Each structure stands twice: as structure tokens, then as C-alpha cells.
Amino acid sequence: MLALRHIKPGDYLILSGGIAFTLWISVAIWSGGIADTALIRSGGKVFKEVPLSRDQEIEVPGPLGTTVITIEKLRARISSDPSPRQYCVRQGWIQQAGEIAICLPNEVSVELTGGAKKYDSLNY
Amino acid sequence: MTASTIKLATTAEDHHIAKMAAVALGLTVLENAIPTPLPGVKPGLANIVTLIVLARYGWRAAAWVSLLRVVAGSLLFGNFLAPGFFLSLSGAVCSLAVLALSMHLPQRFFGAVTHSILAAFAHIAGQMAVVYLWLIPHAGIAYLIPIFATAALVFGTVNGIIAMQFMNTSPQPPLPPGEG
């Protein structure tokens, strides 16, 4: 039988500290900053920078056609895109700073920024 | 032609350290048979030996056992001087550095579990540093830190309890001659 009575008081202290540290670092790393701006790029250049606070639909022209970006309730998504595989549409809503939805064939991307940015740069 | 032999003078202490490193090595081999969900997340059973050696024979012996285990283990698995070896080495070195400090905590209040948890966190910190500075210099690996921290917490605690249990149930073997 495992006798836990030999665990000393300081051990519990360190264990509690370890649990607190693990919880803190998980929250700090996994919950990104609050996003307040959507940065829309087309062909590698910034097409438009819009605040997330106003619900709207934005049409972005690309080489294949028009990509439609919907902004609603501080979230953004690509609601329609002419790309064949529809990866960026199926990605759905993005809402944390640093998240990005990219439609490679149509060269359109929408990136959320605000608060602390998670990346210095993203290249694709 | 006469066969020439090279004989190294070894002390009883050397033999003792070699024996304990062999036990640690056995646990490392055993552990490698356990599948892990993510590379780097493993129980670190060999550290139980390090903890026991630290408590009974001091930091110097623990450092020898730990580093011998890393080097001999890498020879066994064929990754000596490969990235995996440097990950083990940096983890072991960081753990030993933290143990050198934590062993001076008052023994009345802090036992093997404390040392084990602190060493486990130091271990992942050392490994993440090598991963980030050398292997994958990308901020994205930060996303894995909570997973490694959780593993360190769980396995550190379990290993510490096992070491504590062992030391409480097995009498301390007599010190080999020539060792204080």
C-alpha cells in the first residue's frame, strides 16, 4: 500500500505551486489576446483594415474572382471564395488575435490583430 | 606478440556509481518501449534513480549517474550526438543545476517529491530552450509548453512519490568504502 504520509509539507507547497504555474502558463499561452481589427490582404498587399466592432461584409477581388469576408460579433470569417478546395471557408469563424484565414488560390487572407500579436510575421 | 591490457584503476565508488547508472539505463530502455502521444512526453523513470542517489550519496554521485545514463543511453539507442541526445543532455544538465539548489532546502519540510517536481520543470525548460534556439526557432512551439508543463507536473510528482516510497521501505545500503 502506498503510504502518502511521508510527503512533507513543503512537497505539497511545491506541488500546489507547480499546479498553479501549469494552469497559469496554459491560460497565458492558449488564450490569445482579444482581437479588435481585421487585416485583409489581397495579392500580398494590405487591401483594407477594418475594426471588428462593426458588422459588415467585405468583397475582396482576387485573380480567381471575389472573396467575401463577413465580420460579425467581433469575429470574422470568409463566407465565400472561388478557391477549388474551400479550405479558408471551411475554417469558419476566427476570433483571437493572431488567427488567420488564408485563401491561397485567390491570394486573399484575413488576419485578426489587436492586443499583443502572437507572431512578428507570417510568410506564405 | 604479447597481449597488452590497459587496466584503469577504479575505486569502489566508481563501481557503485556504475551500478546505479546501469539501473537507470535499464529504466530508460524500459521506458522507450512505452508509446507516447507526443515526442518528449515520457515518464522519465530513470530520474527516480537520480533522486535516490541524490538523497543518499549526494549531488556529485547523482550528476555522474544522470550524465552516464544520458551518454550510455544514447549509445544504446544510436542517437549519440544526434538532436535527441542534446535534448536529453540539456534536460539532465538543467535538472542537475536545479537539484544542486533545491537539495539545500530544509530537509524537514522538503522531500523527494519537491526535488522531483522542480527537476522535471527544469528538464522541460532545458529541452524547450534547445528546441527553440537550435531545432525549431519558431514561436509556434510555445503552444506545446502547457502540454510539457502538465507532463512534468504529473510525472515529476509520480516519480518523486516512487523515490520517496523506495527510500522509506528499503534500508540504506552501507556506503562503499572511500566515500563520505
Image (spheres, grey):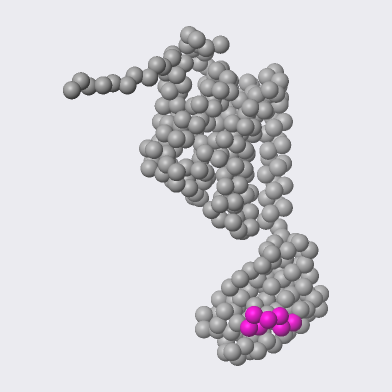
Q: Nearest the camera: B144 or A78?
A: B144
Q: Position of residue B145 (x, y in %)?
A: 62, 49
Q: Nearest the camera: B147 or A63?
A: A63
Q: Nearest the camera: B35 or B120?
A: B120
Count of number-bearing discs: 0
Q: Position of residue A4 (x, y in %)?
A: 61, 24
| Residue drawn at x 72%, y 71% as measured from the top left | A112
**In this image, A30 relative to B34: left or right?**
right
Residue A118: within the magenta? no
Q: Position of residue A10 (x, y in %)?
A: 71, 26
Q: Position of residue B98 (x, y in %)?
A: 64, 32
Q: Is residue B43 above or below residue A100?
A: above
Q: Which residues are magenta?
A: A42-48
Res. B51 image quadrant: top right
Q: Is residue A79 visible?
A: no
Residue A47: within the magenta? yes
Q: Is residue B86 visible?
A: yes
- The quarter of the rendered structure image containing the C terminus of chain B is top right
Q: Main secondary structure of the magenta part?
A: strand
Q: Is residue A46 above or below residue B61?
A: below
